[in-house]
Image (tube, rainbow, N blue to C red):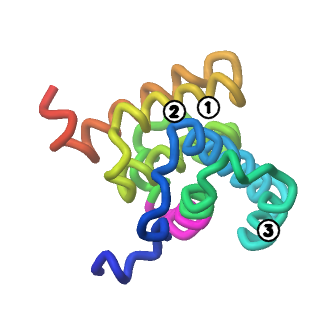
Amino acid sequence: MTEQDSPREQAAPGAPKPTASQRRRARSLALQALYQRHVSGSTCSQIEAEFMVDNDMSKVDGIYFRDLLRGVHREQDALDREYQAMLDRPLQELDPIELAILRIGVYELKFRIDVPYKVVLNEGIELAKKFGGAEGHKYINSILDKLCRRLRLAETGPR
């Protein structure tokens, strides 16, 4: 697959580069959208349209939001296989917030190599602190840290 064939959306040439806070908001909205999809069973298209109308997208990297939402949905089974052996319980028993955070993190590690692994790890931890249970961030940190070493070996180096 060439870059032109990539299902990920690209910013228009000459468009300003999104800020870290716009990306952070995109992740936060993607987490909420994936959670909503999990509990409601609505389609990604329905949820995306709803989020685009109900949120001030001027402060969000909308392209990144769509990429995360659509990409995690499209690659869900492959993403789950990446960390399933690391879980201390069956996938079905994971908190839906933790599950969505893991899927976003693994998606970014595998498909968004433009995002440094340290950013992926930190953002996953921060999302878990904000939206997850009291100790959920430790669980997310443990799993994403192991995945960083495996999926981004060129970046992390052998440890």
Q: Quadrant of residue 28?
A: top right
Residue count near mark 1 (Cα–Cα under 10 Å), binned few <14, some 14–19, many ≥20: many
Quadrant into which the N terminus falls: bottom left
Query: Horizontally, is 63 left or right of 59 in the view?
Result: left
Mark 3 or mark 2, earlier in chain? 3
**Mark 2, residue position:** 123
- Rounded to the nearest angstrom, the CA distance separating label 1 from label 3 is 23 Å
- What kind of element bears circle 2? helix
Q: Quadrant of residue 94?
A: top right
Residue count near mark 3 (Cα–Cα under 10 Å), binned few <14, some 14–19, many ≥20: few
Residue 50, placed above or below residue 101: below
Query: Horizontally, is 126 left or right of 14 in the view?
Result: right
- What kind of element bears circle 3? helix
The residue at the far top in this view is 134
Q: Are marks 2 and 1 in contact (CB under 8 Å)?
A: yes
x and y percentages locating residue 124 in the rendered image: 52, 34
What amino acid is labelled 1 in the image?
Answer: Leu
Q: Residue at x 57, y 23 (%)?
A: 137
What amino acid is labelled 3 in the image?
Answer: Ala
Choose between 4 and 130: the one closer to the eye: 4
Residue 127's label in the rendered image is 1
Q: Residue at x 25, y 42 (%)?
A: 150
The residue at the far front in this view is 14
**Mark 3, residue position:** 49
Q: Quadrant of residue 63?
A: bottom right
Q: Which residues are magenta?
A: 70-78
x and y percentages locating residue 138 in the rendered image: 52, 20
x and y percentages locating residue 123 in the rendered image: 51, 33
Q: Residue at x 68, y 45 (%)?
A: 59
